[in-house]
Image (tube, rainbow, N blue to C red):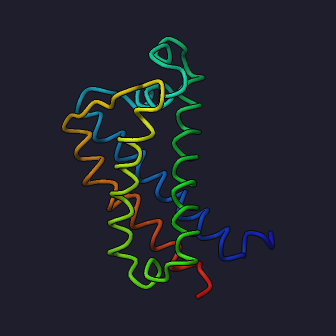
Amino acid sequence: MKAFSKGPFRAIFWGGLLAGMFDITQAFVGFSLMGSTPFRILQRIASGIFGSHSREMGWSPAAVGLLCHFTVAFGAATVYYLASRKLRLLIERPILCGLIYGELVFLFMYFVVIPLSAIGHPQFNLATYITGPIGHPLLVGLPIAFCVRRFSAV
């Protein structure tokens, strides 16, 4: 329990958890407008590993998709926390830096991670624009920045 009270762990845990929950919720809502379901969205995330066969594999890729999603969210929180140790501006200006960081996370995912995965080139549609360039700054970057500020020893 003592490790949970440490600043770095709390900052990364809460930032990653909140960003992951907000991001997956916006994906479920945004992509449901395009006719998808949460189950299919999670399978689509896992298709980065399994390729197009993830749709035929049942619940396993959906569980892997959820795990991958939160791994990325905690990874993003970890990167922000570590960067904040050198760049104090990330803690001093959490709104501006969080919004910029959320956009950078989106750009990195869509233009580096997804093209290198089994998915290949990402598909852009209305839901992508809503959940990506609009949603990521607000629902990924800001929660991470606020949690790092809140739980960081200054």
| Residue at the limit of the structure toward the right, as seen here | 2
Left or right of 30? Residue 28 is right
Residue 142 point in image, percent of width and height = 39, 67
Q: Nearer the viewer, residue 135 or 91?
A: 91
- Give the quadrant of the C terminus: bottom right
Please count the marks in the image. Answer: 0
Question: Residue at 28% across / 30% down in the picture?
Answer: 123
Left or right of 29? Residue 154 is right
Residue 117 point in image, percent of width and height = 48, 30
Left or right of 45? Residue 32 is left
Q: Quadrant of residue 153?
A: bottom right
Residue 118 vertical placement versus 4 (above, below): above
Question: Residue at 49% across / 13% down in the picture?
Answer: 53
Residue 95 vertical placement versus 20 (above, below): below
Residue 112 vertical placement versus 85 (above, below): above
| Residue at the limit of the structure toward the left, as seen here | 126
Question: Residue at 32% across / 62% down in the picture?
Answer: 138
Residue 17 point in image, percent of width and height = 54, 57
- Give the quadrant of the N terminus: bottom right
Q: Nearer the viewer, residue 148 or 82?
A: 82
